Image: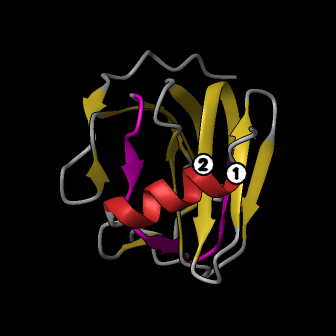
Amino acid sequence: MELLPVRPTRKGPASAFTGDVYVTPICVGTGPSRMSVSLVRFTPGAHTNWHHHAVGQTLHVTEGVGLVGTRDGTVLRIHAGETIVCPPGEDHWHGAAPDTFMSHLAMLETKPDGGDPTTWLEPVTDQHYEQADNKTRRH
């Protein structure tokens, strides 16, 4: 057993996020484990760029309400306690709804060669984000 220290929270880079996003690493697996877990906190309206993961990603919402979208137009409104599984190679984005904070645990595996498992792509347009919010908003 090993007690890991609390790691510093860092602001997510503007090259991967729109708005203010804060990432606190929880653990990075060491052989044979390749599991990586971070707590990611999104301010209202903040979200990731389009991206995908070599071995997929699991998101577990710990607080607030958010949005997750895929290239085929699927959009989910996600709530605290819910878990989303993004399969390997699926382009997606995720972040907070416009009027609330959202936090989630981001769980993924590093590549077998130890390389970065995430491929970052272009930003989600404001229009696309607004359409996703409108599509999933309960009236």
Residue at left offset 32%, top offset 24%:
9
- The reply to whether dot 2 and dot 1 touch (C-beta < 8 Å) is yes
Query: Residue under circle 1?
Result: 136
Q: Which of these two is toward me, 128 or 85?
A: 128
- In terms of image quadrants, where is residue 8? top left
What kind of element bears circle 2? strand
Is 50 above or below relative to 18?
Answer: below
Q: Quick one: quadrant of the C terminus?
A: top right
Question: Which residues are the magenta region?
Answer: 44-59
Mark 2 vs mark 1: in front: 1
- In terms of image quadrants, where is residue 79? top right
Q: Position of residue 123 (x, y in %)?
A: 30, 67
Q: Position of residue 22 (x, y in %)?
A: 34, 31
- Going by the numbered disc 2, the residue's amino acid type is Leu
Query: Residue under circle 2?
Result: 67
Residue 27 can be seen in this image: yes
